[in-house]
Image (cartoon, grey):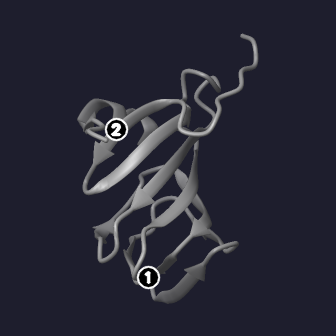
Amino acid sequence: MSGFVLGPGEGRALDFHGASVVIKASGDDTLGQLGVMEFTYPPGLSVHPHVHAGEDEMFYLLDGELTGYCGDDRWTATAGSFVFVPRDRVHGFAVTSDTTARAIVVTGPSGLDRQIAARGTAATG
C-alpha cells in the first residue's frame, strides 16, 4: 500500500441523507482502521437518532454550527470544534447555522464510509 494525496474536492463524491459527502480515505485505504470523509450539511438538516455499532465517530467542524447530543449529553459545535461520539451510543445533530456546515468526519474502525458508498447516490453538483 502506498500513500496518496487528494486535493480540495477530490475523492468519491456522494449524496447521503441530505448531505454531500466526499470520501477522502476508506477502510480499503486504511486496512479497515479508519474512514475519513468531508461532509457538507445544508442549513436546517437534522440527523435522526442513530448508533454506529462498534465504530467511534469524530467530527472536526470547519464551517457552520451543529447542535447535537450523545446519550444525555448536549453540545454545540462551531468552526474549530472537535466532537467525539463513542461507539454504540445513540446520537444525532442538527445544523443550526444559517449557512452550510462542513466537517471532517473520521470513524474507526471504518464502517460509515462503506455504508455511504453502498447507499449514497452519485453527487449531483
Answer with left or right where residue 14 lies relative to residue 25: left
Query: Residue 98 location, x and y as percent?
Result: 39, 82
Q: Residues within 10 Å of mark 2 (few under 14, many from 20)?
A: many
Residue 68 placement: quadrant: bottom left
Q: Which amino acid type is shown beneath numbered disc 1?
A: Ser
Residue 99 is situated, as x and y percent measured from the top left of the image, at 42, 75
Toward which corner of the image does residue 92 lie, by quadrant?
Answer: bottom left
User: Amino acid type of disc 2?
Assistant: Leu
Helix, strand or loop at label 1? It is loop
Instruction: Look at the numbered disc 2 and give the secondary structure of its residue.
Output: strand
* Residue displayed at 30% across by 77% down: 44
Give me the residue at 47% from left, 53% from top: 39
Seen in the picture, residue 24 relative to 16 is either above or below; the reply is above
Whether label 2 touches label 1, CB < 8 Å: no
Return the disc, 2 or 1, that comes first in the chain's sequence: 2
Left or right of residue 119, residue 64 in this image: right
Residue occupied by mark 2? 14
| As drawn, 76 above or below 91 | below
Q: Is residue 74 left or right of residue 43?
A: right
User: Where on the picture, by quarter, is residue 112?
Assistant: top left
Label 1 crowding class (10 Å Cα cut-off): few <14, some 14-19, many 20+?
some
Which residue does the image show at 57% across and 69% down from the upper left? 63
Who's the residue at 39% across and 71% down the image? 90
* Above or below for 92 versus 57: below
Label 1 belongs to which residue? 97
